[in-house]
């Protein structure tokens, strides 16, 4: 039975339309996996040499063991951010003569083959082969590896349990997070030296191999808790298959003053606020504000202009690039409704424009303190802001009509490849590279400020001819709207 | 066959289902009618242990459906598309259901024979996934899957909705035939009063979660129902 269920899972993944449609994306993804996989693999084999180099007087295995608890704590944090809950998919089986316990086992086992669980093995195994086996022999090394893998899976199940409690008993999850935080704080003040504990604990397994039973028993217990909880809660509504959320977010009354456009902007704000994917994208965009930190503290970048223009474009525009690259896919679920309503494409795009401009101005204002690193950053960011408002927004609009893939807004945006296509990569080129190319001749002839002024001027031209550009966008859209509507009707 | 005792489901302080008692005898076909929000689907979900009742129990053949899974072996059901495994092809899905019930390929073909007219050549051997079928054809697939195991109890939610007129009549005849040949116990909800009184000998009217009328079908039933629903 479990095999049948796993076979279904395989089919579900393989037949998901995202996977089937874009072969190019799969190749890129495959290459990325290969790239990072090999990096980890090489790291694993070279790790004991590296550790010897950095900690010359210590045993590399002991150093490695000492880092493990840190690693598992960080691992928990990462899992909290990105691990998906393997819940569903059991709904179609609930009314069939499949024992409930089988379904629960299936849900729990399904969570094991994830890259969060398997990636660390790429480091653990080579390190075991190159360092632990020569020192302790194969048998002990394998038990040691078992202990590490058991800890990884323990993290996996602990997190599944606590993340699931987040909706019903948030205090449980909060308490769990507080404990982890307390451990970190105690470690910081040297009251509970995590490194020593970790070194002792994992060292003990190498000395007394039977101690491997401890993590294994813990793992079994975590699995048991999950099993018990899920067995008692296999009701779809309790697993949040069909979650009915309380309507949130009040009306943005002040937008009514702007008439039709204001109402469309309000609609879009609600769309962003009430769906998981755009909301998580927004969070990522906030992180981009700190992008400047990577560059502004480095003098080699601060001397020139080229890189800083790129950074300025990214800081003032990233939220719009992130959100805009999927345009108008955000509305894919009700696209037909929009086309049949009394909304012209011109209004549709004008509303988008007036959603984007305030957002970019706001990010620009938030980034003003970067001026402390030098007034030229403010000059550059101003030019970049104008260029984004006048030119890049329309580039986003131009490419938007090629996004014919429907988006499922209820999924998170991290590692979500739905709707990501070749046009995204093509689109990024003119937006990032063009301003630098425009600047380059002036920069090379020693007139950097004239170069900046040119970029800003181009942006201003765009702002001045905004109406014409929007009309042109709307016409461009009209030519492609049937293709868009057809694409959006195909649910994935 | 089914015994409902003191059953209650409360969402946000309002009882969407509240049934002090309801008995369904073996071999009986019960039609459940009622306007939107009457609690028909929630009731069916509780019968199938898909929703945890706030209070009370559902007993199928004397055992509580929430505590034992025995009912699954003799109950066929189709409520909505959530019952389908939509990334499988129709044949794969039927095979999966057949495997669960220990049926051979031959059994499947034989049991699908009565569906030949209903399927109208649009369902089998189509080389496409269930998710890509129209709503009407998905419904036909779901109903066929529910009947594949030859169940003693059949629970269908709005079986006639989304079907074209010919399919509705074919489905109605199919259900009547199953009644005659196998004395199958049925629970069918519908907004189509004509069809439901033809198939069912007993009609139950729900309103706001409460049972308001329980009648045996006679030639006057349709008039009575129409009178009831004319507001």
Image (spheres, grey):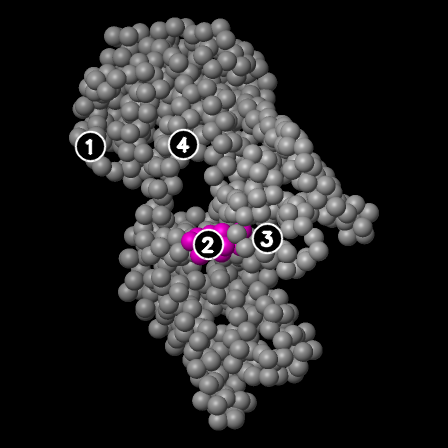
- Relative to A251, A17 lies left or right: left
Real-space Cα distance between discs 4 and 2?
A: 28 Å
The stretch drawn in magenta includes residue A41: yes
Real-space Cα distance between discs 4 and 1?
A: 25 Å
Residue that numbered label 3 is attached to: A48
Mark 4 near mark 2, Cβ–Cβ under 8 Å? no
Q: Earlier in the sequence, mark 4 or mark 3?
A: 4
Residue that numbered label 4 is attached to: A6
Magenta segment? A33-44
Real-space Cα distance between discs 4 and 3?
A: 38 Å
Residue B125's disc is 1
Real-space Cα distance between discs 1 and 2?
A: 44 Å
Residue that numbered label 2 is attached to: A38
Mark 3 near mark 2, Cβ–Cβ under 8 Å? no
- Relative to A294, A7 lies left or right: left
- Relative to A208, B83 lies left or right: left
Residue appearing at x 63%, y 60% in the figure: A53
Dot 1, crowdedness within 10 Å: few (<14), some or many (≥20)?
Answer: few
Subunit under mark 4: A
Residue appearing at x 55%, y 73% in the figure: A311
Subunit under mark 3: A
Secondary structure of the residue carrying numbered label 3: helix
């Amino acid at each position: 039975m479990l095999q049948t269920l796993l076979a279904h899972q395989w089919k579900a993944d393989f037949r998901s339309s995202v996977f089937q449609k874009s072969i190019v994306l799969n190749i890129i993804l495959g290459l990325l996996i290969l790239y990072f996989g090999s990096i980890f693999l090489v790291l694993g084999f070279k790790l004991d040499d590296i550790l010897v180099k950095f900690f010359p007087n210590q045993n590399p295995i002991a150093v490695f063991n000492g880092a493990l608890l840190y690693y598992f704590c960080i691992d928990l944090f990462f899992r909290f951010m990105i691990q998906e809950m393997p819940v569903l998919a059991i709904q179609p089986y609930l009314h069939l003569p499949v024992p409930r316990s089988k379904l629960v086992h299936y849900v729990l086992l399904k969570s094991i083959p994830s890259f969060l669980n398997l990636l660390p093995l790429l480091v653990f195994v080579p390190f075991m082969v190159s360092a632990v086996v020569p020192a302790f022999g194969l048998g002990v090394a394998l038990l040691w590896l078992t202990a590490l893998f058991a800890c990884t899976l323990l993290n996996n199940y602990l997190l599944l349990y606590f993340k699931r409690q987040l909706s019903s008993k948030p205090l449980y999850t909060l308490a769990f997070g507080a404990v982890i935080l307390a451990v970190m704080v105690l470690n910081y003040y040297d009251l509970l030296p995590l490194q020593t504990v970790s070194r002792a604990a994992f060292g003990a397994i190498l000395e007394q191999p039977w101690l491997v039973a401890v993590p294994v028993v813990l793992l079994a217990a975590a699995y048991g808790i999950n099993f018990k909880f899920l067995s008692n809660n296999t009701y779809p509504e309790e697993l949040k298959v069909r979650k009915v959320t309380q309507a949130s977010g009040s009306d943005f009354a002040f937008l009514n003053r702007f008439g039709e456009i204001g109402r469309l902007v309000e609609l879009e704000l609600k769309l962003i606020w009430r769906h998981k994917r755009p909301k998580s994208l927004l969070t990522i965009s906030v992180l981009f504000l700190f992008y400047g930190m990577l560059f502004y503290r480095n003098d080699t970048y601060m001397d020139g202009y080229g890189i800083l223009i790129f950074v300025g474009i990214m800081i003032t525009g990233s939220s719009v690039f992130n959100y805009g690259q999927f345009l108008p896919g955000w509305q894919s679920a009700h696209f037909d409704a929009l086309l049949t309503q009394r909304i012209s494409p011109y209004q549709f795009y004008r509303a988008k424009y007036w959603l984007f401009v305030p957002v970019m101005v706001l990010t620009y204002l938030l980034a003003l303190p970067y001026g402390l690193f030098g007034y030229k950053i403010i000059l550059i960011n101003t030019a970049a802001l104008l260029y984004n408002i006048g030119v890049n927004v329309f580039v986003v609009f131009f490419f938007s009509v090629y996004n014919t893939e429907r988006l499922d807004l209820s999924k998170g945006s991290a590692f979500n490849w739905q709707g990501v296509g070749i046009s995204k990569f093509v689109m990024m080129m003119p937006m990032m590279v063009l301003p630098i190319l425009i600047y380059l001749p002036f920069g090379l002839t020693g007139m950097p400020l004239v170069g900046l002024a040119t970029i800003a001027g181009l942006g201003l031209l765009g702002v001045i001819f905004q109406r014409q550009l929007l009309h042109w966008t709307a016409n461009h859209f009209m030519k492609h709207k049937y293709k868009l509507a057809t694409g959006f009707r195909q649910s994935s | 066959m089914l015994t409902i005792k003191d059953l209650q489901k409360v969402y946000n302080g309002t009882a969407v289902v509240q049934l002090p008692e309801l008995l369904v005898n073996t071999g009986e076909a019960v039609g459940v009618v009622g306007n939107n929000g009457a609690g028909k689907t929630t009731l069916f979900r509780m019968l199938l242990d898909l929703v945890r009742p706030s209070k009370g129990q559902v007993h199928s053949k004397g055992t509580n459906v929430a505590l034992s899974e025995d009912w699954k072996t003799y109950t066929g059901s189709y409520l909505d598309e959530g019952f389908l495994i939509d990334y499988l092809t129709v044949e794969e899905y039927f095979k999966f259901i057949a495997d669960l019930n220990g049926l051979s390929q031959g059994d499947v073909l034989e049991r699908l024979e009565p569906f030949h007219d209903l399927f109208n050549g649009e369902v089998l051997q189509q080389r496409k996934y269930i998710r890509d079928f129209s709503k009407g054809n998905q419904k036909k697939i779901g109903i066929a899957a529910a009947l594949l195991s030859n169940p003693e109890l059949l629970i269908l939610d709005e079986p006639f909705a989304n079907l074209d007129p010919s399919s509705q009549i074919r489905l109605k005849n199919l259900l009547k035939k199953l009644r005659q040949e196998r004395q199958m116990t049925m629970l069918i909800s519908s907004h189509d009063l004509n069809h439901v009184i033809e198939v069912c000998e007993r009609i139950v009217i729900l309103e706001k979660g409460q049972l308001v009328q329980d009648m045996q079908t006679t030639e006057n039933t349709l008039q009575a129902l129409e009178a009831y629903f004319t507001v």
